[in-house]
Amino acid sequence: MKTVFLLLCNIFSIACLGQTGSLSGIVSSSNGTVEKPSIQFGKHKLIADSVGKFLLQNIPAGSYPLIISGIGFLPYEKKITVVADSVVQLKITLISKEKDLDDVVVTGTLKEVKRLESPVSVEVYTPVFFKKNPTPNIYDALQNVNGVRPQLNCQVCNTGDIHINGLEGPYTMVLLDGMPIVSSLSTVYGLSGIPNALVERIEIVKGPASSLYGSEAVGGLINIITKSANTAPKISADVFSTGWGEINTDIGYKLRLNEHTHLLSGINYFNYQNKIDKNKDGFTDITLQDRLSIFQKLNITRKTNKVFNIAARYMYEDRWGGDMRWNKSFRGGDSIYAESIYTNRWEILSQYQLPTIEKLMLSFSYNQHFQNSAYGITQFNAVQKISFTQLTWDKKMGKHDWLLGTALRYTYYDDNTAATADADSSSKKSKPQKTWLPGIFIQDEINFSGKHKLLLGVRYDRNNHHGNIFTPRIAHKWTINQHNILRLNAGTGFRVVNLFTEDHAALTGAREVVIKNELKPERSYNVNINYVNKMHLSGVGAINLDASLFYTYFNNRIVGDFDSNPNQIIYNNLQGYAISKGITLNTDISFKNGIKFICGATLMENTLTQNGKTAQQILTEKFTGTWSVSYKIKKLNSSIDYTGNIYSPMRLPLLSSHDPRKANSPWWSIQNIQLSFSGIKNIEIYTGVKNLLNFLPGRNNPFLIARTNDPFDKEVQFDANGQVIADAANPYALTFDPNYVYAPNQGIRVFAGIRFLMK
């Protein structure tokens, strides 16, 4: 009997062994091997070998989840079925986290935190993204960011600002390394002088951020973070030119001054001196420019590893646009029209972490911006000085992560117009605008569990002209699981308007400035819901989805009235409200075959309601879309990038009901293609075509600039009320007007360039 029992046990054991299988595979990436990827299959765990190979044996037949992860890569997840007496063989390619949620961001909460963990939604863009469509400056580079549009405001001098979700440029705050150095007067020309070569990344927060950053961060903010001298490449260079004759040169180099000190230097030079008039109106199609920007950043490594850096930048620019016959001898005269602007700007900024046990960060910045310009016969000379200092204390206590800070901002502004004239002075002596803005803020980020975070914050500012201002905010992040995140943000914002710094219409110097009442700061109330989803699909690759619903209500909007009285500029708070609302979606898809899509779309509505009447805000589209399609050809060491944007119609500024120009823009799109070759050590060569569709805003319009034949209005007839009289020489009753502009007036053109990088 015992012998029979042993025989049955042996037969059962053999049968059980026959019910197992094996799993083998190799793990790689689009760039080669993956360093020590970890494999988890059901309850089995192991580390692959140096070339990514792995083998699991004696696995009971059945279906199990397979999870493969590697440092710097998205996890691979799939359910695998093991069949008895067989080997399942796999070949797996991991996707790089090139634009994943593990990026470290600082803009949303004023402290370093992984983007995945931030309760505030922050979009991050690296130089890799901007190289898909090379541009000479940050202003132009932002054209392929969803919901962000560089808006030209003048057809002659090509001034511009940055719109976020349809809101005008003054509602966007631009920071350099967290310092508010680009604002007011400098937003007109300062943005074009920031070179791309020194940018480490750009962080964008859409919606009010005034509780942390104060005035101007009402519509959103853009934080341009420069490279660290410690980690920057030794030498970098990027030179390209276009078929129109534009030449852009970026050069960067790093010096090791001693064991603890590194110096990063950068030079950007842009030149365009080719007069082109393809629409035959006698005026330049785009502005001629000669610009030099020099940047230096010093990083000092301290024994305590605490932060200490100092950076400085200088920019000079000479630009003009106008009559093709113009030269500098006509500057300021009334015979041949042009707009000529000389800009001198310098800035310094520093961060120093105090040598204390507590984490205390002291930040400082100072800049001076000088503008010497002539708009026809109108001379406009202005100076702006901004000093800013801030001290923050970062402290974790249990579930609470505190941030306390105090800031002081001083703005000095003066120009030669009636806007700053001393009303009590018979000598018309200038009376500069001086604004003191001290403030304090406190923020508490509460981590209730691994899934919920609550952020509470409030800021108090004291404006010497407008008094006390409070701006609270609240944010909640719910990590549903490792693939899904939901954020809710709400708060208020405020903006103290800097009058006259950007209004070309106020540059006549003859208007009387009238402020009807004591102007109140503009207020906004905002709510934003953000949803993020990460997916890994078998046979496809990685898909990231980022969707947001936004709603902002504005009151106390300050609007300049230039129409009621031609001899006055009348300022008053809006008798009504404004609303900005919409939905935006960003997605990036990485396929295993090397194709990558980055696409975005925003559907929005921006309205202005006054005296019971609601209208779409001028120069604001209702739909915008952007895309980038990239494909790497590994065998040829090449890549192809196809980028573009598309905009729906927007309401345009007309002079009167008789103006023959279109009241609304058409659907329009700017598309580009680039081919790059990187088969030579340290060198990348690229070429392509910009504006593939050759779109021009002058199509289907009789003209863009009104009355280029009479830019000084010498032949315009006015009635007793200052209104234009129609006659045979002026049948549409127009005056000279360069403000009818919504898209670049530059057609199709080729470009070619070369990049050099030595690490």
Image (spheres, grey):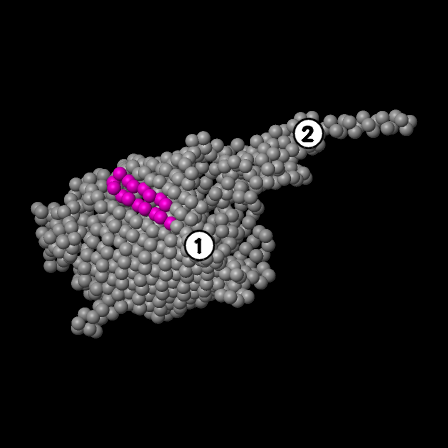
Report the mark closest to the observer, 1 or 2: 1
Q: Assign a secondary structure to mark 2.
A: strand
Residue extending farthest to the left is 728
Residue at image location 14% in from the left, 53% down from the top: 330
Compared to residue 29, the image places residue 611 above or below, namely below
Q: Residues within 10 Å of mark 1 (few under 14, many from 20)?
A: few
Highlighted range, magenta: 237-252
Name which quarter of the figure residue 466 lies in: bottom left
Q: Which residue is mark 1?
A: 256
Residue extending farthest to the front is 258
Residue 356: x percent and y percent?
53, 67
Q: Assign a secondary structure to mark 1.
A: strand
Q: Which mark is residue 21?
A: 2
Residue 504: x percent and y percent?
23, 56
Type of the residue with mark 2: Gly
Residue 349: x percent and y percent?
39, 61
Residue at image location 50% in from the left, 36% down from the top: 30
Left of 488 or right of it: where is 423?
left
Compared to residue 44, the image places residue 446 above or below, namely below
Q: Residues within 10 Å of mark 2 (few under 14, many from 20)?
A: many
- Depth check, front residue: 14 or 675: 675
- Depth check, front residue: 208 or 268: 268
Residue 568: x percent and y percent?
20, 63
Left of 442 or right of it: where is 579?
left
Counting every numbered tag in the picture gives 2
Type of the residue with mark 1: Arg
Name which quarter of the figure residue 557 lies in: bottom left
